[in-house]
Amino acid sequence: MDDRRRLVPGTDTVLADPRIAAETARLGAGLVKDTVRAVLQECRDGTVPLDGVVESVLAALPRWATKLRPVVNATGVIVHTNLGRAPLSTAAREAVAVAAGATDIELDLDSGRRGRRGASVLQALSRVVPAAESIHVVNNGAAALALAARTLAADGNIVVSRGEMVEIGDGFRIPELIESLGVDVRDVGTTNRVRLDDYAQAIDGNTGFVLKVHTSNFAVQGFTSAVDTSELASLPVPVVADIGSGLLQPHRQLPDEPDAASALVAGASVVTASGDKLLGGPQCGLLFGTNELIERLRRYPFARAVRVDKLTLAALEATVTGVTTPVQNALHRTRADLCARARHISQNLPTALGAEVADSQAAVGGGGAPGVTFESAAVALPADLAKPLRTASRPVMGYVAQNRLLIDLMAVDPADDQIIIDTICGLPANGRGAQA
Ligand SMILES: *Cc1c(COP(=O)(O)O)cnc(C)c1O
């Protein structure tokens, strides 16, 4: 054992190897050094052979300088919050790369003077939502709502239906978010019913606006009544509509999902939405509205604290001007196509796995179209493959139902079908796994 320890090379020797030095230049010294130390320890412990230390380090190094990895979303949830919500289109990914260096985000190259930040994305958005006199972009949907509340109702109150007091996820609640900004939240009506008069009676001289929140992650059924934006617009204060999911225009497949254009036409003074749900873009918050109110929001000091970055603006511009988004593509997939893909994948897997095509139900997820499901198809596998597939070098995330692992293809780009096949075939044959 001691002999072996003496033969183990020093950290600096390994770091000096040209192949390792190249990785240091690419990934950074800290990450590479940590990996070298870990491999050398395994070498001393005898779990890694003495010859080929460099090869072992190279194999252990991550491909990128982030521990984040691309994951195949086979959950059947199109906008999956834990998987980063909307995947970006190729056009949006390319736009991010373009904006990554120095870029004219706030410079008018013609005049050489300072320009309006993100002017081109604002133009692109206003072409899609002409009903918006003015548009502003912030970090996320919650920031958009917070900016509206802070600017338009500071030290006052807002009025909202009790049935729209939404918890958006991870324990965050819209009323608590607004109250944390020093704005009083007055809820009116009951869980299931509210009338225009309830709002009218709650409004006083300190009311900044009436808030209409889309109940984006639940649905109340039965004896219910709500007040439409068009009716709320008759009240003596502005209406702010938080539509959540970020549709810019009505969507044929999702008739109950609100959209920015319709909310403005119905009389909302300000509409807030997320960029990374049904819009299919990067995480951001969109504010559409009247010139007067949007300009007030834009100039309010708190606006600087939720300023959106250049990568996001670039991706957003490509999303609203460019090709259809992966979210759109997913919504358009038919069960017949998905079945054919599931059959193709199944036929290319080791027969010992007993893979078969199964019916599956997909959903929008991530705060959109609650209760709406789509007929989808999946590859059914033994449930104990869930963890090995999740932890593979190219993770595939499915879901377990009735003791089977379902690889739902609704949210999977067809180009990734081969990755699914390769990942499953590459699993170590641990008892029942795939034979190489
Ligand atoms: C998702 C959602 C939010 C929060 O938006 P983020 O972009 O996640 O900050 C707010 N309101 C509604 C109705 C939503 O659906």
Image (cartoon, rainbow, N blue to C red):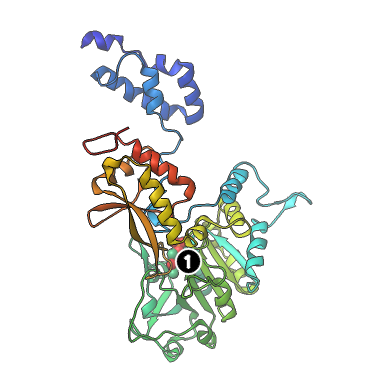
- Residue at the image position 56 percent from the left and 76 percent from the top: 262
* Amino acid on which the number 1 mark rests in the picture: Ser
Task: Classify residue 18 as left or right of residue 189.
Answer: right
- Few, some or many residues within 10 Å of mark 1 (<14, 14–19, 20+): many
In the image, 359 versus 79, the foreground residue is 359
Q: Is mark 1 within 8 Å of ligand 1?
A: yes
In the image, 201 versus 348, the foreground residue is 348
Quarter of the image where one finds residue 132 = bottom right
Task: Classify residue 163 as left or right of residue 262.
Answer: left
How many numbered circles does the render carry? 1
Quarter of the image where one finds residue 293 = bottom right
Dividing the image into 4 quarters, which one contains the C terminus? Answer: top left
Which percent across, then down, holds residue 219? 36, 75
Placement of 43 over or under 239, stated as above or below: above
Label 1: element kind: loop
> Residue beneath label 1, please?
245
Which percent across, then down, holds residue 269? 57, 77
Dividing the image into 4 quarters, which one contains the N terminus? Answer: top left
Which percent across, then down, holds residue 283? 49, 56
Seen as rendered, the residue at the extreme right is 111
- Residue at the image position 44 percent from the left and 60 percent from the top: 336
Image quarter where ligand 1 lies: bottom left
Whether residue 69 appears in this view of the structure is no
- Residue at the image position 36 percent from the left and 80 percent from the top: 162
Placement of 90 over or under 14, stated as above or below: below
Placement of 213 over or under 65, stated as above or below: below
Which percent across, then down, holds residue 307? 55, 56
Whether residue 92 appears in this view of the structure is yes
- Residue at the image position 62 percent from the left and 41 percent from the top: 101
In the image, 425 versus 310, the foreground residue is 425
